[in-house]
Amino acid sequence: MALREIISTGNDLAAIAAVDAGCRFFGGYPITPSSEVMHTISDLLPAVGGTAIQMEDEIAGVAAAIGAGMAGVRTMTATSGPGISLKAENLGLAQMAEVPLVVVDVMRGGPSTGLPTRVSQGDIRQSKNPSHGDYKSITLCAGNLAECYTEVVRAFNLADRFMQPVFVLLDETIGHMHGKAMIPTEEDVKAGIVPRKTFEGPAEEYFPYECAPDQPAVLNPMFKGYRYHFTGLHHDKKGFPTEEIETCRKLIQRLEDKVEMHKDELESYEEFHVEDAEILIVAYGSVSLAAKEAIRHLREAGIKAGLFRPITIWPSPAERMYELGKKIPKVLCVELNIGQYREEVQRAMSRLDIEGLFKVNGRPISPYEIVNKVKEL
């Protein structure tokens, strides 16, 4: 794949990626530290025939974006943790009605207002279950500037493939980081676009929610002559509310199975010096950059450290983590929270002896801090 060089910030790259991936609608509301995503995409979309709109609040922003998704348009919103809290009800609607949507979440501290201008990775649990009920979230996490672009592109293809919201996590450090990134050309991105499936038969034979137990709904764009119903209620094959026992059971089971049974299409991770590692560092997002620098220093000191970085956070690459957990004696999770992903690492590795290095004061974790922690172990 051909690459192009660009000097930009993570937030701006997320906006550029969306437009290159075919996004033609953005609905949102400014919130630190994600506001630049909206600022940039509002400049870019009109030039390609798209629309960006700042709504009156976060709730209206995601509602507008979902409406565009219902009309068949590739659509996105961007926010941070407090905005996700407000968008939760509508995100549940998108899960139930199976409307594709990309959500860029630039993480900051919490709960509530937290530390608006500082870095955190406090939305890991939230991105797994942003709304109530039974479903499987899809959450990607950028670990460098290039991935602020490539993971957003991937998110749009996954949203259309699985017909549901897909999260892309950045954090304040990586969102505001300014530097050089090598990203795919616009032509290659467009060539790789996988449009959502549509039904092309007679309208009377179209049942959008009548599909295989492990497959998403097939929602034709609105205003194209195919009649069906959108609802947040349990619904039948045409989308109309129902309480029929077996129909409801199959619907909810399918919302989980369409992701769970196709995890191989979602799994993505990076390994750095794990082949001979005696201590494994698990880190993601901007923290993984500090971890790599720490590992270089540790290896110079004769300590065999390695990095496992999940790129797909949910569903997690649990099988690979289990394999690494069986052969590497010590494991250290480094996070800008108090261990939200360590719980998943413990589950995946079937181990309770996972060490942690956590920070929640809004400041980044330095390579020096990681080196010292590893030496303690």
Image (tube, rainbow, N blue to C red):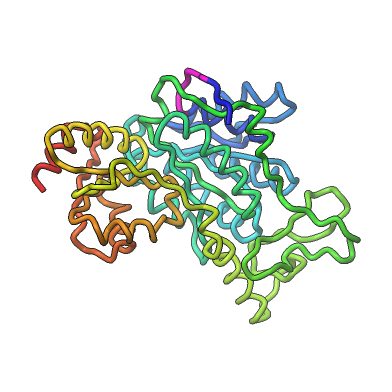
Q: Specify the segment rendered in magenta.
A: 5-10
In the visual, does 237 lie left or right of 313?
Answer: right
Q: Nearer the viewer, residue 32 or 238?
A: 238
Q: Nearer the viewer, residue 375 or 324?
A: 324
How many numbered discs?
A: 0
Residue 265 position within the rendered picture, expressed as x and y whole percent measured from the top left: 55, 54
In this rendering, the answer to whether 262 lies above or below 244 is: above
Q: In what quadrant of the picture does the N terminus appear?
A: top right
- Taking the view exactly as shown, the residue that stands out farthest to the front is 276
In this rendering, the answer to whether 334 lies above or below 97 is: above
Residue 294 position within the rendered picture, expressed as x and y whole percent measured from the top left: 21, 34
In the visual, does 29 lie left or right of 108?
Answer: right
Q: Nearer the viewer, residue 238 or 275?
A: 275
- Identified at 71% across, 67% down, the residue is 211
In this rendering, the answer to whether 228 lies above or below 303 is: below
Is residue 9 covered in magenta?
yes
| Dominant secondary structure (helix, strand or loop) of the stretch shown in magenta | strand
Q: Nearer the viewer, residue 117 or 261?
A: 261
In this rendering, the answer to whether 351 lies above or below 40 is: below
Residue 120 position within the rendered picture, expressed as x and y whole percent measured from the top left: 32, 39
In the visual, does 38 lie left or right of 286?
Answer: right
- Identified at 60% across, 39% down, the residue is 76
Is residue 268 covered in magenta?
no
- Identified at 65% across, 39% down, the residue is 192
- Taking the view exactly as shown, the residue that stands out farthest to the left is 376
Residue 354 position within the rendered picture, expressed as x and y whole percent measured from the top left: 21, 56
- Identified at 18% across, 56% down, the residue is 329
Q: Quadrant of residue 43?
A: top right
- Taking the view exactly as shown, the residue that stands out farthest to the bottom is 245
